Image (spheres, coloured by chain):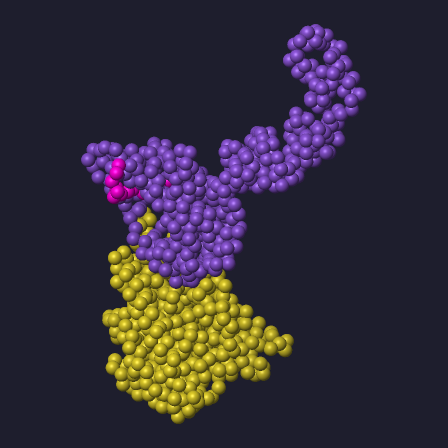
Chain colours: A purple, B yellow
Amino acid sequence: MKYETVIGLEIHAQLLTESKMFCSCSTRFGAKPNTNICPVCTGQPGVLPVVNKKAIELAIKSALALNCRIEHRSVFARKNYFYPDLPKNFQISQFELPLATKGYLDLKLNGGKKRIGITRVHLEEDAGKLVHKGAARIMGATESLVDYNRTGTPLMEIVSEPDLRSPQEAKLFMEALQHLLQFIGVCDAKMEEGSLRCDANISIRPAGQIKFGVKTEVKNMNSFKAVEKALLAEEKRHREVLTEGGTILQETRFFDDITDTTTGMRSKEYSHDYRYFPEPDLVPVMPGQNWIEGIKKGIGELPEHKSERFKKDLELSAADAEFLISSPALALFFEECLKLYPKAKILANWIMGDLTAYLNANNLTIEKVDLSPAALTDMLKEIDKGTISGKIAKTILTEMLKTGKTVKDIIKEQGLTQISDEGALLKIAEEVIKNNPKQVEEYKAGKHTLIMFLVGQVMKLSKGRAQPEAVQKLLREKLI
Amino acid sequence: MNTKTAHELHSLLAAKKVSSVELTESVFERIEKVEDRVRAYVTLTKEKALQAARKADEKVKKGETLSPLEGIPIALKDNLCTKGTLTTCSSKILANYIPPYNATIIEKLQKIGAVPTGKTNLDEFAMGSSTENSGFHPTHNPWDLNRVPGGSSGGSAAAVAADECILALGSDTGGSIRQPAAFCGVVGLKPTYGRVSRYGLVAFASSLDQIGPLTKDVTDCAILLNAISGHDPKDSTSADLPVPDHRKALVNDAKRFRLGLITELTGKGIDEQVVKAVREAARKLESLGAIVEEVSLPTFEYAVAAYYLIAPAEASSNLARYDGVKYGHRSQEGSDLINMYYNTRREGFGPEVKRRIMLGTYALSAGYYDAYYLKALKVRQLIKEDFDKAFQRFDVLLSPTAPSVSFKIGEKTADPLSMYLSDIATIPVNLAGLPAISLPCGFAEDLPIGLQLIGEAFAEEKLLQVAYTYEQNTEWHKRKPGL
């Protein structure tokens, strides 16, 4: 039988705030265990949470970028379950009334677009980290230690509609989401580091059937690749079970990255009645229209729109446009340059060519390198003026990136200006003619392509400081 | 000296007639003398008290003026977090717990130089009406040592009544300040929800808990209320409203005050002598110029039922953190996580706490949430509306604080329901988030009777004015137990 796969994702994104969701502890990653903690985030008796406004702002920003409706009143709720990484033994989350609902994210698929619905976006706090001795999980461990540094880090949960139809689509969705969250600056969105996490609900149904099949929830996918692999494995398992006439058990399954299989988790670990109820220590979140509008303005142009504009208004190719929006910093750099130097295609070529090659070779990103838009465009202007050749410019750009010097300084220091003095150029040309009698002879006999060889010789002798067009013109005149 | 009120002592300190150290010593002498019979305290902090007292005396010596509570010994209910001092909630599960931080009100009291005598006994986690549920020992009523002081702030109320402190702080979730104040013949006020920061008050039921004063008279009540009120950025539910000087409400004048005597709390189910005393108090106020009429609040009969769903539901979640992982008691039995949880909580919590955790867990469970928790919230809303309606006609409502005078130790421990009903008059006030005060209004067989005055949200001044007027024109508050 032909089956259709149905996937919905639950994504957790750590928000880039300085402090935690409900206290003023630092969210800095990599500190010594249990140093970024306080009475509030370790759940001491008597403490109370206070909402981090910045976290709400970033979540609203994300929700707006995901085309969601921002609810005028949302409520924090307690999700009750016992686990040692959760100091209060409840997580402050949102349940019945989330921050935002009813959005979507468009995927680029087979040359077209596929719209994936976003059910909701809400805020919650992260749990701590457990380290076990003697077993991989707490069950069976001989000793377990807990680090509360991460406890209370703001987490944004994004839930998609069951609109994804394959593991590949799920992976694409995660990549698109990562790009968006990074672009608007709300999240590092690195799956390997855990700042972006995802659980997936997957089911299959006979093609054409409307009713969903029984779903399983897959956890522990720590990379985009793992999302795809885990779902492929689970999809295969569903098919095999159903083909053999079996039934799928609704359960949570743990993905093993080494064996590429999923295994059911022990029901003792994962059968919960969370007993949600409104968090009585917090008041409802009621973002005013002005605040929301302000956040909206702060988002600026979303990558998708930017790419469209680059193609349409700047006449860049799709590949160029996609490349330039691949990071917000790069897009910004490009647009700042464009203000100073309006030839988009030339600019794009330099950024995507020599500049990117240098960045890649040195494992750098545009924001980490000492090159201002003015510096780059000054150099391009020097080429246009004919002060330097394109070839020399490549050397100069590398020098600029290494030293942070201006194009003018480098030209002056190294005497790299083009030889525009006719007399000096003539001298070199005459020397080349003299030293290459054979080629001169053949040229004169009608083998005109040899002019390029002679130009090359002049360029070589002038150490690239001659302007090739001028040299060619001069040689042609001399060899008539 | 220790029998005097804070405002009397403040004058004596300022006039250099006594020193704070002398006063503090006299309080600890009294404690030495009666504490083994009353057992109001869980922890005494004599060293810290003397330190604060010396500081106050230094100031007097230098000619600096003292703030109203500076150098005055105050007892603190043991569910208020005190940095460096045991805070047990009278629970075995926190028997060794020393908080790393101070409650906001403790910071406030330290700043104004109050003298902390110690931490007072309570029903474990403030769950109870007799202080018999303490995980350590019961507290005895100074008026009759065979009787309960009320609860859950029984330790604080008994300490004030027995002059083992000058004033005290308690907390009130369903009557835990007012009912013990009534049983011990002192003044107790539960402020409007949001008036006093809850940061550092160990939560029982977060949407109902409120810290408040237990004092020897209404004036001290106003002074202590001034000291603890106000917005706290650490408590999102604390009200960002200006705080009036409550002492300005201490005016001996009840004229034109419209008082509503609550029908439902002056009839069936209430002890006859209590009703009689409350009616006499109403007449007294009438004679002082107030207008008294009866008012019916028909939803009151559902209040206790709603409360025993909402409060345990919140408690079941609030008390989840006591698991042996981070602090407090950890069972030595069991070799895995689940058994550590089970055994720690089995050993650490007393029967009443367990009962309420189970009640609350049940009320929040899938399939029961709508029928119990949500329905209780609806009842809560109806009770609020009943109050709103009543306050269109009245400034202040009158009732007994408790349906009876203090009962015998052990009398109700086997019957939780009858114990729960001893809060029948106080619980609706918490559900509606309103302020209410209890003050002595008579005696039945030498046991004090409490009069409850209920006001609109943030109308503590009206309560204090009516209470002050009543107090100035009666003698009840001057009686002392014959310990």
Q: Residue at x 36, y 88 (%)?
A: B292
Magenta span: A207-220
Describe residue A335's horizontal placement relative to residue B30 as left or right: right
Describe residue B433's horizontal placement relative to residue A356 as left or right: left
Q: Residue at x 33, y 56 (%)?
A: A276
Nearest to the observer: residue A261 or residue B474 = A261
Q: Residue at x 72, y 16 (%)?
A: A476
Q: Position of residue A473 (x, y in %)?
A: 71, 19
Q: Is residue B413 above or below residue A290?
A: below
Q: Quadrant of residue B273?
A: bottom left
Q: Is residue A58 above or below residue B133?
A: above
Q: Residue furthest left?
A: A245
Q: Is residue A468 visible?
A: yes
Q: Position of residue A14 (x, y in %)?
A: 46, 47
- Is residue A212 highlighted in magenta? yes
Nearest to the observer: residue B255 or residue B29 = B255
Q: Quadrant of the C terminus of chain A?
A: top right
Q: Residue at x 69, y 22 (%)?
A: A469
Q: Residue furthest right?
A: A423
Q: Is residue B279 above or below residue A120?
A: below
Q: Position of residue A132 (x, y in %)?
A: 39, 42
Nearest to the observer: residue B60 or residue B399 = B399
Q: Main secondary structure of the magenta part?
A: loop
Q: Is residue B143 visible?
A: no
Q: How many marks?
A: 0
Q: Quadrant of the N terminus of chain A?
A: top left
- Is residue A110 highlighted in magenta? no
Q: Position of residue B3 (x, y in %)?
A: 46, 82
Q: Is residue B381 above or below residue A130?
A: below
